[in-house]
Image (cartoon, rainbow, N blue to C red):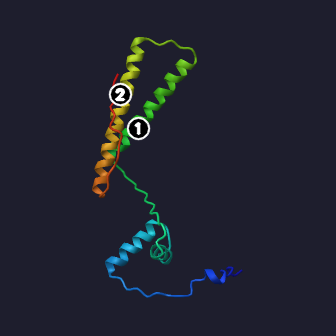
Amino acid sequence: MARPKKAKELQHKHQIMLRLTDTEYEIVSESAKAARLPLAEYVRKQVMKQKVTAKYEIMVDLPELKKLIAEFGKIGSNLNQIARHFNSGGIHSQEMRKKIDQSVTRIYEMKYEVLKMAGDFHSLAGGYVHGDTETHSE
């Protein structure tokens, strides 16, 4: 079955010839790829000043990051156990409260380690990372 024809006013009948250097072509081509658009549609949107949003997917394989993710998993498990304990009417002591406060402080420390790693990685890529600079302490 053939593809349905576009309405006459939507058909792209006119061509514009454009010459690019290898570098220019590479930049435009990569930008179109990042925007997940065909090259012609990307260029058309750029020429018509329509908004084009690039979609980047960054994959990082850092041993430090894997270690922190594993720690976050353990912390999540511990928090679930604590919540179960309190929800079932369990009592808590000053020592338990102190340990919880220490754990929350450590979570914030790890958050900043991750933000620093992301910032270091992102700065290598020429960008920047905004992070919350508030410090948690009890």
Residue kind at label 2, given as amino acid type? Thr
Q: Which residue is mark 2?
A: 105
Gap in angstroms between the C-alphas marked 1 and 2: 17 Å
The image shows residue 118, relative to residue 31, as above or below, that is above
User: Relative to residue 79, is residue 23 drawn left or right?
Assistant: left
SS label for mark 2: helix
Q: Residue at x 52, y 23 (%)?
A: 83
Q: Residue at x 42, y 35 (%)?
A: 72
The image shows residue 100, relative to residue 70, as above or below, that is above
Crowdedness near tag 2: few (<14), some (14–19) or many (≥20) residues, C-alpha within 10 Å: some
The image shows residue 94, relative to residue 104, as above or below, that is above
Quadrant that contains the N terminus: bottom right
User: Relative to residue 109, is residue 35 drawn left or right?
Assistant: right
Q: Which mark is residue 36?
A: none
Residue kind at label 1, given as amino acid type? Ala
Residue 67 pos. (x, y %): 36, 40
Q: Of all residues shown, which one is farthest toward the right?
A: 1
Q: Nearer the viewer, residue 92 or 43?
A: 43
Q: Of all residues shown, which one is farthest toward the front?
A: 49
Crowdedness near tag 1: few (<14), some (14–19) or many (≥20) residues, C-alpha within 10 Å: few
Lower sequence index among marks 1 and 2: 1
The image shows residue 125, relative to residue 89, as above or below, that is below
Residue 5 pos. (x, y %): 67, 82
Residue 117 appears in which quarter of the rendering? top left
Quadrant that contains the C terminus: top left
Q: Which residue is mark 1?
A: 70
Q: Residue at x 45, y 73 (%)?
A: 46
